[in-house]
Amino acid sequence: LEKSRKSKEEKKVLRKQLKASHTLLKHEGVCTTPQPTKSLVIANGGLGNGVSREELTAALQEMGEVEKLLMPPHKPYAFVTFRSEDGARKAHANLNGWKLQCGESSITLYLSYVDSVKCKEAASVPLPEGLALVEHFVSPEEEAQLLNVIDWSPTQGDVTAQKSLKHRRVKHYGFEFRYDINNVDKDKPLAAGLPDECVPILQRCVEQGHTNVLPDQLTVNQYESGQGIPPHVDTHSAFEDTILSLSLGAKTVMEFRHPDGRVAAVVLPERSLLVMKGESRYLWSVVFCVRITPRKVDMVPAEAPRAGAPTEPGIQSNLTLSRRGTRTSFTFRKIRHEPCRCAFPSACDSQGAPSPSPGPSLPSCPADAARLEEEYVHRVYSTIASHFSDTRHTPWPRVCHFLSSLPSGSVLADVGCGNGKYLGVNADLVGCDRSTALVQICAARGYHAFVSDALSVPLRTASCDACISIAVIHHFSTAERRLAAVKELVRLLKPGGQALIYVWAFEQEYNKQKSKYLKQIFKEDHGEFSSTNLLSEKSQKSSGEQISDPSCHLENSHKPSDNMQGVSRVPDAHLSVHTNRTAFISQDLLVPWHLKGGKSQQEENPDLFPVFHRYYHVFQQGELEHLCAQVSGVKVKSSYHDQGNWCVVLQKE
Amino acid sequence: MKLLTHNMLTSHVKGVTKGYPLLIKATEVKVNQLDFNPQFVSRMIPKLEWGALVQAAEDLGYRQDLPGELIADYEQNEEFLKKVHRVLLEVEVMEGCLKCPESGREFPITKGIPNMLLNEDDA
């Protein structure tokens, strides 16, 4: 019996390994081979799943002498080359299907031989032209002094311009940079010029030749651990060529992206000065805070850059993870008064290029919100309906449990029923969805369903014994609309009736468990909630149910993301596109859906295999309870985390 | 659209106060044979708007002789439950529309699916 069990386990490993090879080929163009070679691809052993170089190296070195370990940024795999084929064989024999302990969780590795290590990211990318990093530019005393200058308490009479953006705090001196127009109002200087404490530092910049002119605008950004900023190029027409940026408080990684796809990561140690000129200022997009897992870590080069020396070309695959603290950046710029005449017209708004707008922004009015959802939710579901439906076949156990706990003959509504996954679980359910194409799938399966909007459900008030709203409310793009959706659900309930709500969680790792979404990197890369094998392995007991008093919950753990009362709310930069199967960088984002063919085919043939983006607002812990607490006549009966979702059961009074 | 669904649906056009029940204008009606479950039908009856169900059945020509007022002790009356089963679950409007009794706004029914979406101005 023991033997047969073992062989079953072996079969499972083999199956998963084959699947991983297949996915690597399909999505990443990585070709594996059955014949032993010196090199292996390690599926799940990547920075993208929170595996650090140190942890992986330790395991590999026990198998033989490692010649090279490549860890491409964000990717869920790594490549190892051993000195000898023997080492690779040993690693394959011992580590395939083996659980690597990384931090507090473990992850199963799958190894396959590769003929050669050819990954795009493996090539070293030189630093962007015009970029220079000067380490130890300010002393610790100056650092402390500068950080003290910034008063984050709310200001009256606006001598500086202070904003709480979605993911950071910002303060402007000299001139305000307006995120709504992506430019400065050059006729309206702020009452407060640059703080005096900055003057000696700026003079040093001039003396050392980093810039010719003294800047007249300062933007101070403060990023709490785990916050980031989406890719952007500073508007050409707003500022002159040289941009100086001081990093204070904590080190971070700044990633530069060239329009042709090249990516270069630069570590910015605390107290360093980054000088951006020419191509690096005009053409490369900047993105901070490349968050790998909710453990709040950055990718940094495995070896510390040499102090004082010009930064080495960023070798992309020589990265590991580093924990992050609060970083404050001082970015000094000189307002431009003439049109920009740079050599990069494709990125230059002065030369007719559209102002940098890679995608939609968060809506600033209800009409914008409806338009965003129309284009980035409704139309996408219409288009992907049948493919989406093919990937949504297994109902989630805890939703089923809720449905089957209700007495037979109850009047039940599934608001946002999709392909009718739950309509088959309980015959009393009537479903509705915004997508006609999905409702047609329900009807074809013989379920009762109609087309309607979750903000205006055409069902009688107080007619339902229970309602479910599964993976729906995260598609509404403003807090007001999310609240309206909850109110509409509550309206449908009879007194005493219950509603179950699931929304996608910002926290994809909870109680030291990664969600299936993060773990199943080698499932098909189809947006959220891979529906297969939901209840496999040990993660099934991960959800920590808490019968909660919502008020106490709020105080203890709610980290509000929209708590901007008293601070003017400005639209932040554009919505960023999420990298599937990684942790979230921001709460409002676009999630790609690769229709059929998958990612690699999409890249080769974008017309046949287009990619679609769906808008999501992922909820932080406590946020859903906070939302529901704003609805009168209903109480939060329980709340829990289930496989990367926040969930509540509401009861109408 | 089954009449069970119709019994739950109401007009949600802005400003409408009496949007229930929706009038049915059917161009195609089909009757499916479904397993009769007397317990299920018994449990559903008290949750229904009885008058709306009878009216809808009448409009479609499937009222049989269902009374305008719900009878007592229907749980024991298998013949009655079978009739209710028929109108509630077996009769299905495939094509046509639902009309708001107050505003006159029509919602199309296509391939059995009511489309209750409103335009921005009447939402």
Image (spheres, coloured by chain):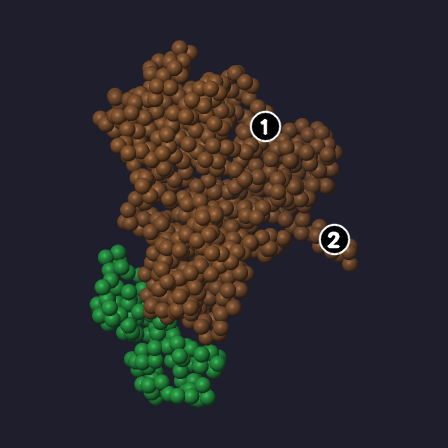
Q: Residue at x 60, y 52 (%)?
A: A539
Give the drawing colour for chain B.
Answer: green
Q: Nearer the viewer, residue A512 or A356?
A: A512
On the image, the x and y values in percent for residue A140 come to 48, 20
- Indicate which label's residue lies in the foreground, 2 or 1: 1
Q: Is residue B90 above or below residue A206?
A: below
The answer to whether residue A436 of the structure is visible from this angle is no
Instruction: Tell whether B103 sits left or right of A331.
Output: left
What residue sits 33% from the left and 86% below the top?
B69
> Up-down: is A640 above or below A51?
below
Q: Chain of mark 2?
A: A
User: Quadrant location of the C terminus of chain A?
Assistant: bottom left
- Whichever of callouts 2 and 1 sits on the residue coming sooner in the sequence is 2
Name the residue tied to disc 1: A302
Identify residue for label 2.
A6
Q: Chain of mark 1?
A: A
The hue used for chain A is brown
Q: Secondary structure at mark 1?
A: loop
The amino acid pointed to by label 1 is: Ala
Q: Position of residue A80 (x, y in %)?
A: 64, 33
> Is any part of residue A600 visible from this angle?
yes
Name the residue nearer the viewer: A371 or A40.
Answer: A371
Quarter of the image where the N terminus of chain A is located:
bottom right
Query: Residue A41 in the image: x percent, y percent?
Result: 63, 38
In the figure, is residue A441 to the left or right of A172? right
Residue A329 image offset from top left, x and y in percent: 42, 27
* Amino acid tagged 2: Lys
Give the quadrant of residue A565: top left
